[in-house]
Amino acid sequence: MTDKKNIRELDLSIAPYGMTKERNYEVVLLPWGATEPHNLHLPYMTDCILAHDIAVDAARLAREQYGVLSMVMPPVTMGAQNPGQRELPFCVHARYDTQRAILTDIVDSLHRQGFRRMLIVNGHGGNNFKNMIRDLTADYPDMLLAMSEWFRQARATDYFDAPEDHADELETSVMMYYHPELVRLDEAGEGTNRGFASEALRTGKVWLPRHWNMVSRDTGIGNPSLATAEKGRRFAEAVASGYAQFLNDFAKVDTVTDLYDPWG
C-alpha cells in the first residue's frame, strides 16, 4: 500500500503543476475502469479504484527500482457494459465511439505536450482497446501506445483458492488490501453463476456478450467469501512488480525498432 506523501509526483489526482512542470516524465499510465455494480459488497467504482491503485504502485516501484519517472492519470470511468448489467441502476454503458473519442482526446493532448509513451492499465473486462490503438498508431506514428489488464499480470490461481470473474475472491481481496473500509463482505452475495449451454460459447471458440441477468443473481461471478487482505496484498505486489519491470523496458524505447530483438 502506497503512502501518498511518497507518490505526489506520480499521481496526477494529487500532483500540483508546480511539481509536474519541473520533471521529465518518461511514461504515462492511464487507468481505465467502469461504472457498474460489483455484487452487493463492493463499490460501483471498483474497476477504476483498483486500476488506479495498481498503476500508482507500479509507478512507485519503477521509480524506486529503476529510476523511471511515470505519471498516473486519473482513471477513466466509462466502460462498456453487457446487456442485463447496463439496465441496472447507475450502471453506465460507454459505446465504442465514446471510448474512442475519450482515448483520442487524451492521446492528442499528451502528444501535443511531448509525451511519447503511454500504457493503459485496464481494470474492466468489457473494455477492448486494441483496434483503437491500431487507429491511433496510424494517426500518431511516433507515439507508443500499449494496453494491459492488471488482473491478468499474475497467475490468479497461484494466489487465490477460487478466482473467477467479477467481484470474486480476487477483486474483493485486492480491494480489502487497498481500501478495507469500502468492502462490506458480510453483505456479499454468493456470486453463483452459470455458463453457456453451447460448448463453442462455453469454451470461447465462439463469442457473444453474456446477458448478465441470465448468468448471475447478484451481478457477481465468483464467490468472494474466501477473500482476505493478505491474499490481495500478495497479488497486488506481484502485479505492480511486473508492471514496474515493463515500465523500465518501455522507458528505454525511443523508436519502434527498439521494441524488437535484433535479427539473428
Image (spheres, rainbow, N blue to C red):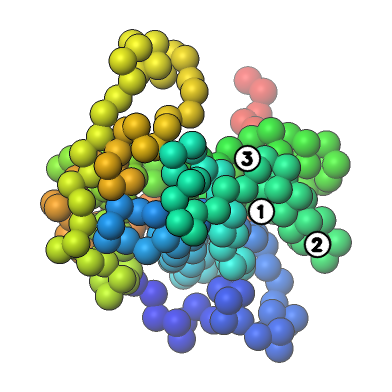
Residue matched to label 2: 109
Q: CA distance from mark 3 to mark 2?
A: 18 Å
Nearer-N-terminus badge (3/1): 1
Residue 34 image offset from top left, x and y in percent: 51, 54
Nearer-N-terminus badge (3/2): 2
Q: Residue at x 64, y 35 (%)?
A: 130
Residue matched to label 1: 118
Indicate the quadrant containing the N terminus: top left, top right, bottom left or bottom right. bottom left
Q: Indicate the amino acid at tag 3.
A: Phe
Question: Of tags 1 and 2, which is closer to the observer?
Answer: 2
Residue contact between numbered discs 1 and 2, judged by CB atoms under 8 Å: no
Q: Nearer the viewer, residue 61 or 239?
A: 239
Residue matched to label 3: 129
Q: Secondary structure at mark 3?
A: loop
Q: Nearer the viewer, residue 83 or 117?
A: 83
Q: CA distance from mark 1 to mark 2?
A: 12 Å
Above or below, 13 relative to 94: below
Q: Secondary structure at mark 2?
A: helix
